[in-house]
Image (cartoon, helix red, strand yellow):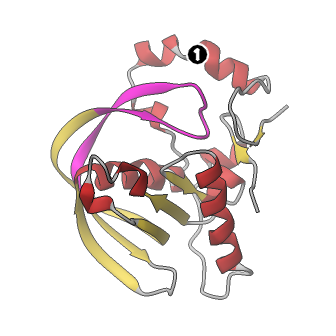
Amino acid sequence: MILPIYVYGQPVLRKIAEDIKPDYPQLNELIDNMFETMDRADGAGLAAPQIGLPIRVVVVDLDLLSDEFPEYKDFRKVYINAHVLEFEGEEESMEEGCLSLPGIHEAVKRKNKIHVTYLDRDFIEHDEWVEGYLARVMQHEFDHLEGKLYIDHISPLRKQMVKGKLNAMLKGKAHCTYRVKTIK
């Protein structure tokens, strides 16, 4: 089932998400719905707060980038109770967008190597170092679990430049091709 994506201004996007237990109600159905919602919106990742749930669940699909990054062929993962433990490496700037901020794309600086822990769909624990583009995507999505948006990482000048679009979202005007839930 395709779910509405919560856009800028929704309070759930600013809440710190909570860890869940294996008996979370209908978790597999939720994960499937998140993938379907993300796919319909042409996203690379989707965090549960973006569908109105303050829980630590993220889905990522990087297969759409496999022409440019062959290592992401068939890459489709679920991250449950995910946490970034450390940031390392060089800081790199790259343009980002977000399904919760339709129509806005900005350059964001992020470290290119992170240490993460998470549970997979079977609740098997993983503790790993991640580098490159996947590290960027994970930081972007895991930020949602901390109540942060990528615009929190841009300069005050750039934030001022997108203020009109942000204000329009606050008034319930989000223009995109997928279903959204605004505050109006």
Q: Nearer the viewer, residue 13 or 66?
A: 66
Residue 132's place in the image compared with 8, above or below, is below
Query: Which residue does the numbered mark 1 point to in the structure image?
Result: 163
Q: Position of residue 164 (x, y in %)?
A: 63, 13
Residue 141 point in image, percent of width and height: 47, 52
Q: What secondary structure predominates along the stretch shown in magenta?
A: strand
Magenta stretch contains residue 116: no
- 110 over 61 or under it: above or below: above
**Pick the front one: 66 or 26:** 66
Lateral position of residue 134 relative to residue 78, left or right: left
Disc 1 element: helix
With respect to residue 78, does 4 lie above or below? Answer: above
In the rendered structure, which segment of residues is drawn in magenta? 94-114
Q: Identify the residue shown where x is 33% and y is 54%.
A: 66
Q: Residue at x 78, y 36 (%)?
A: 182
Quadrant placement of the N terminus: bottom right
Position of 40 with respect to 155 (left or right) is: right
Q: Is residue 180 above or below residue 144?
A: above
Residue at image location 53% in from the left, 25% down from the top: 104
Instruction: Rate crowding at label 1 as few (under 14), some (14 to 19) or many (20 or more) other CA atoms within 10 Å.
Output: few
Q: Is residue 114 visible?
A: no
Magenta-drawn stretch contains 99: yes
Quadrant occupied by the C terminus: top right
Question: Left or right: where does residue 47 sit relative to residue 111?
Answer: right
- Residue in the picture at 64% in, 70% down: 32
Residue 156 image point, x, y percent: 43, 18
Image location of residue 148, percent across then percent down: 51, 44
Residue 138 lies in what quarter of the image? bottom left
Q: Which residue sits furthest left?
A: 89
